[in-house]
Each structure stands twice: as structure tokens, then as C-alpha cells.
Image (cartoon, coloured by chain):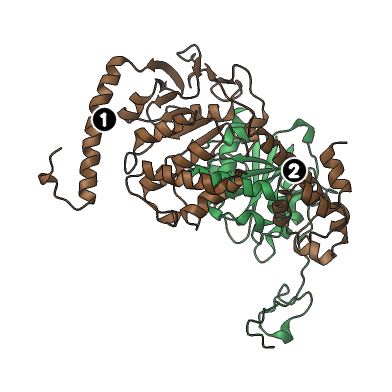
Chain colours: A brown, B green
Amino acid sequence: MSKIKRDIETLPVAALLEEYPFIDSYFSSAGLEYSPREQLPLKEYLHSLEDEFREDKAIDVDETVSGARAYIEQMLEFLGLNSGTRVRSVSILPGTTKSGEAEGFEALEIRPGEIVSIVGPTGSGKSRLLADIEWMAQRDTPTGRQVLVNGTEPDKKWRFSTSDKLVAQLSQNMNFVMDLTVREFVTLHAESRLIENTEEVTGKIIAKANELAGEQFSPETPITSLSGGQSRALMIADTAILSKSPIVLIDEIENAGIDRKKALELLLSEEKIVLMATHDPILALMADKRIIIKNGGIASIIETSEGERGILHEIEALDRRIQTLRGELRAGKRLDQITI
Amino acid sequence: MNLITVSGPPSSGKTAVILKTAESLRQKGFKIGVAKFDCLSTEDDQLYAKAGIPVQKGLSGSLCPDHYFVSNIEEVTQWGIREGLDILISESAGLCNRCSPYIKEIRAICVIDNLSGINTPKKIGPMLKSADIVVITKGDIVSQAEREVFASRVGMVNPRATIIHVNGLTGQGAFELSTLMHDEENEVDTVKGKELRFPMPSALCSYCLGETRIGEQFQMGNVRKIKLENQHEQN
């Protein structure tokens, strides 16, 4: 019998809480008003409650007991993984296009600190590629691709793990719906990731986000009133610093109100693998490689050339000019009086 | 035939998730049918019919929709078998957060959306707590951080469930969900004799029986009164 199972069956609720403090939040989600002095094991304690109370709170004894076990197992695993599972590489092995032809590449290996951009018309299969990576496809998705981590087939448990996903996704829309301030929100997220020094990490995320955002915001700003650029900045800083997922999938970072170059640098400084669907020349050329998608498959993979990097400098200068004009406009100045 | 019960709060995306998942399942050669249970009206049966999926619709009208579901699930199961379905999906909206239509040994999926607020998982009760699979929708319109916080709240309420994110519009995640839908070991030819996973709430009061007048003299049967906090207590 496992230790967790034995503990749940034999330890009084009070002792169980001492052994596994995090189970507290499971109990409160289950509708239990436990008292720290409970000296009965969980199952007996649940049975000792009045029928009416259990019925009101929709508590099923067996379900609650087996749920407690599952919760403890998950949390222990999650805590244990904090230091382990380093991703050193992700490889994509080819499958087929929508019409069943072989994809136009041998194998693609991506390492932490690398950026790969994904280009192709709408509906060509960019999202499917991102989904294949997120799902760790093993020739069992419509494309037939295989994804390897550290050169081997990854454990299937990653597919459905919520606490320890391999992939974090930054979607195009970064709306917030919760009614919280920036500080409360980041703290809540940090807590759900079981971070120990919540306050320090929260402060760091907000400071980094402010470096990325065109306009500053305070920790007391409600998240629902952040601008599009500020929201994106906060989410990128949050993903870079808080998310343990070694791979970040980005579905286009919009131009407005955020320093995209700094944003990518921040993600890379945290040793992430960045895959990014984009048609923005600056972002596409900042990548080391770009994947060309056609007809549901990877048609080819292009390495960013020296010549292309030269163009990158030009468009960056252009972009800086536009950003400056944007800043002047915001400050209420006339643009015909500005020399750049 | 496999029977799968799908349930979730109104507008959480049940129909969209089922439609996208059915697409993947049909590509694998399975024959899918849907029984849609709702309260007053639904147009979803037309969506299924349009997609070429055999569908039955049941409206509970003045009855409690979940009670109506349990009273009719066997009939619907027999219909599915006659149609020669491989998988019959029953879809029903959880309207009161207290009932749940899940049956022991029958795979149960709860669909819940990211927009419903972080305290919602706690409020939903047995429909979420006793599901085997929890599908979280509308992930594309919230941030990664909110998705993570929301999923961790769901996991707190139901640690045993497999949680999977599905986008009902693009179908992202639907293929992945479809891999969990069919189970050769889980064939049913009847649900007679099976049991609900969780009893539906006990209630039979005068209002269940059509009373409309308000006042203590009209309240009969299983009635419970609110406990008001006395805010101006004087010692």
C-alpha cells in the first residue's frame, strides 16, 4: 500500500493537514468545513458529518476520499518536478500534407534559446503544427508527425497534465476577464504555480512587464483596464518568469504598445524554446529559422541568412521611427516639428 | 455502442465541442449520434442535422431537465442502438448547478468555459466534481495565466479528471479529445439497472406542484428558510 493511501486511511484529518498542508484548498473546494482538531481519519470524519450537511454540499464520501488521494499525488509530483525535467531539445519528424504527400524536410531540432518562426497563409496548417507540438504528436494526429523531447518519445502523461505542461501558449487575444488588480492577479497565478517567494516574483514580473510596455502601469491597476500592449507585456513577462513550460508558442505578437524585441529577449533569457506564428518581417527575421507551411504540411525550412539580417536592421530602424512618432503623438506633440 | 454523457453550464460550448470532436471521430470511421436534452427550446439539433449527425431532441418543458434526462436516457440509448451508432453522445445543460446527469460506468464529460470566473468550478458541484473528463473552452480569449489559474481551480475541485482544452471555433484540442471518446471495453446495450453517480436534490414543495402565490401559508412540503444575519444586533 502506498504511503499516501495509508496516510489518508489512518491519519486523523488534523495530522493529514500537517503532513500535506496544500490539501487545505482541496477540502475547501469540496465544501468541507474541517476543524483542525479533527481526530478522525478522513473517511470516518466524512461519515460522522450530518447527512443533511453532506447532501447540501453535495459531498460523496468515497469520491471525496479518492479525490484527496489524487490531489495529493498530483501536488507531490508537481512539487517534485520543480527541479527535474530539463528540456534540452525538441525535434519534429515529418508527416504528410493535406493531400498525403511527404513534408519537405528531414527533421527539425530546436534547442532552448532558439526562435523559430512559422509562416504561411491562413488555413495552411500553422495552428495544427502548434497543436502537434503541444500534444507531443506520436504519428497519431492528422498530419502523422512525430515530436521528440531530448531525442526520445516523451511520456504520454504530459499530454493531459495541467500543472506541468511542456508548452505555454501566448494567443493573439490576451484579454483579461478577472476582476483583480495586476498585483492580485499575478499573485494568484504565482500561488497556483506553488511559487514560494510570491511577493518577490510578482514584483519582478510587474517590473519586467513595464519595461516591455509602451506605457507604464501600476501594480494597483485593474487588469481589465490594461491596454492591449500592456496586457501583452504583462502576459509575456508572466510567461517568461512564472511558467515552467520550457516551450512557448506565440500566435503573432501585435505591434502596438510593446517592445517586441525586448519581449523575445526576455523569453530567451529564461532559456525557453520559442515558436512563433507570424507574418511580421521583424519577428520572422529575428528567428533563427522559419518554417514554411503550405497545404497542411511543412513545405520547407529556411535559415535566416546574413543578407536577411541586414534587412532586419533597416526595418528595425523604420520601426523605431514609427515608435518614436507614436510616443510623440501620445505626448500631444505636433509631428511636423519633430526631427528624427 | 458507447454512451457518453456531456454536460455543462449553458453557453459553455458543449455543442461546438461535440461537433468538432464528432468530425474527428467520423474521420476514423465511427458512426456518431447525439441526443440533445434542453429545457425550453434548442436549435442545436439543426446544427447536428446539418453536419449529417443523427440527432434526437428532448425538451423538458416544465419539468426539471435532469429528472427528464434520467427518465428518458434508456429510450434514447435504444434509439442509438437501432440507428447502429458506434458512439451516442447525450448533451444536456446543467441548469441548477446541483444536478448532474452522470451515470456510473458511463463516461462523463463536463464542459466549462474560461470566461465563467475563477470561483465557478467550486460552485458547479457534482456535474464537475464527478466527471471523468473536464473540457475547458474559450481558452483563445483569455490569457495563458488565466487559463492556468482556471485549470488549477478545476483540478482542485476534481483532481481525478483528465482536463483538456478545446477551442470550439477552430477545433484545436478536439482531435485530442476524440482519442478519449471510444472505448471497446465500454459497450452498453442498455442503461437499465445502472445508477446515477450522484442523487439529484431532494425537493418536493408546493411550488414544485404549481403553487404561484407567495407567503408562508402557501409553503408546504420540503421548505427551508434563509438564515438572515442580524446586522444591528444590540447587546
Residue found at the very far top of the displayed protein: A106
Secondary structure category for the residue under label 1: helix
**Quadrant where the image shows the N terminus of chain A:** top right
Q: Position of residue A75 (x, y in %)?
A: 70, 41
Q: Is residue A162 left or right of residue A266?
A: right
Q: Position of residue A231 (x, y in %)?
A: 41, 47
**Quadrant where the image shows the C terminus of chain A:** top left
A327 shown above or below A311: below
Secondary structure category for the residue under label 2: helix
Label 2 neighbour load within 10 Å: few <14, some 14-19, many 20+: many
Q: Position of residue B199 (x, y in %)?
A: 79, 58
Judging by the rendered image, the residue that carries numbered circle 2 is A72
Residue A134 in sight here: yes
Q: Could you tell me which residue is drawn at 37 percent across and 28 percent down?
A: A121
Q: Could you tell me which residue is drawn at 79 percent across and 77 percent down?
A: B221
Judging by the rendered image, the residue that carries numbered circle 1 is A316
